[in-house]
Image (cartoon, rainbow, N blue to C red):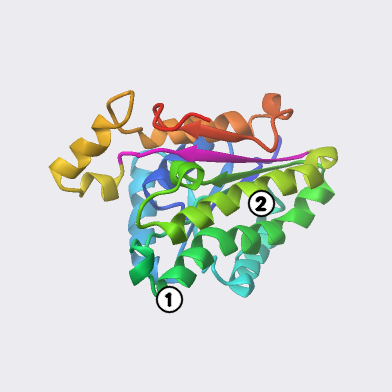
């Protein structure tokens, strides 16, 4: 009997994170869905919902904007279950404002959660991946990290920075059996986008060549592709999943 590889998805109880956790669990991984410590009650309800759907997914609290708390979280997982083989950096927030109105708190909050977390968590699993001679790191960026977006200098900066991290770390991991890649979704049907006013959502969809938003499962499928053993020659890539909204 082989032991299932451990996968950690930060922001795992969110809309896209949920689909990624479900897909990795279906593909045979031992999945941990990270959530912020303040979301404990929501995480417990989420775990129960997943169990009801037939998914055995563990939840784990951790403030990924903190290096110390990220280390505690990783130590907890690896101390009990072995090295994290797959890391999906999916945690993210928005604090949208025009630059003229963008205060330091809104800037730092987005950079800390969306970009610094990528260092905080990846740094704490990296040595385990090196020792195992295997690893998959997937950074969930955004189309707006590729093309920019009005009112999102903080968010676009963080998301663009994620791929710079990807390309650089991919070079360090390439000879060690570790791949590092980025997935850049476009607009995706989540609770956040479904809560938009109808006219706003319709205007967004009208600008997408496919004339629809993506589904979280389509992002999860891209992650599954990059995680698979047979795709171990793909590294340093930025895989766009945006319905043709931005082509580069």
> Which residue is tagged 1?
105
Place of residue 198 in the rendered image (x, y in percent of width and height, measured from the top left): 14, 42
Residue ranking furthest to the front: 100
Mark 2 neighbour class, 10 Å CA radius: few under 14, some 14 to 19, many 20 or more: some
Residue at position x 47%, y 53% from top? 156
Would you say 130 lies left or right of 61 here?
Answer: right
Place of residue 92 in the rendered image (x, y in percent of width and height, measured from the top left): 45, 57
Place of residue 110 in the rendered image (x, y in percent of width and height, measured from the top left): 46, 64
* Cα distance in 3D space between marks 1 and 2: 23 Å
From the image, give the main secondary structure of the stretch colored magenta.
Answer: strand
The numbered disc on residue 165 is: 2
N-terminal of the pair, mark 1 or mark 2, is 1
Q: Quadrant of the N terminus?
A: top right
Q: Let me know if residue 136 appears in the view.
A: yes
* Residue in front for this viewpoint, 146 or 217: 146
Mark 2 residue element: helix
Residue at position x 60%, y 67% from top? 70
Would you say 127 lies left or right of 234 here?
Answer: right
Relative vertical location of residue 211 with respect to residue 46 in this rendering, above or below: above
Mark 1 neighbour class, 10 Å CA radius: few under 14, some 14 to 19, many 20 or more: few
Residue at position x 49%, y 47% from top? 145
Range of magenta residues = 178-189
Place of residue 172 in the rendered image (x, y in percent of width and height, measured from the top left): 80, 47
């Amino acid at each position: 009997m082989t032991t299932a590889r451990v996968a950690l998805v930060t922001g795992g109880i969110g809309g896209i994170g949920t689909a990624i956790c479900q897909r990795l669990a279906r593909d045979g991984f031992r999945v941990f869905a990270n959530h912020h410590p303040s979301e404990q009650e929501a995480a417990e309800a989420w775990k129960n919902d997943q169990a009801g759907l037939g998914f055995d997914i563990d939840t784990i609290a951790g403030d990924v904007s903190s290096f110390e708390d990220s280390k505690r979280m990783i130590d907890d997982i690896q101390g009990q279950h072995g090295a994290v083989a797959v890391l999906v950096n999916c945690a993210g927030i928005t604090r949208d404002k025009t630059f003229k109105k963008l205060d330091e708190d809104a800037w730092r909050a987005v950079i800390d959660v969306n970009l610094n977390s990528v260092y905080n968590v990846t740094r704490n699993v990296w040595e385990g991946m090196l020792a195992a001679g295997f690893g998959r790191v997937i950074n969930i960026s955004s189309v707006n990290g590729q093309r920019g977006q009005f009112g999102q200098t903080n968010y676009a900066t963080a998301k663009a920075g994620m791929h710079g991290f990807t390309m650089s770390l991919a070079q360090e991991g390439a000879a060690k059996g570790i791949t590092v890649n980025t997935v850049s979704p476009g607009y995706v049907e989540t609770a956040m986008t479904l809560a938009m006013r109808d006219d706003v959502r319709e205007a967004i969809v009208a600008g997408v060549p496919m004339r629809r938003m993506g589904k979280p499962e389509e992002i999860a499928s891209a992650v599954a592709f990059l995680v698979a053993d047979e795709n171990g020659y793909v590294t340093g890539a930025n895989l766009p999943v945006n319905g043709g909204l931005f082509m580069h």
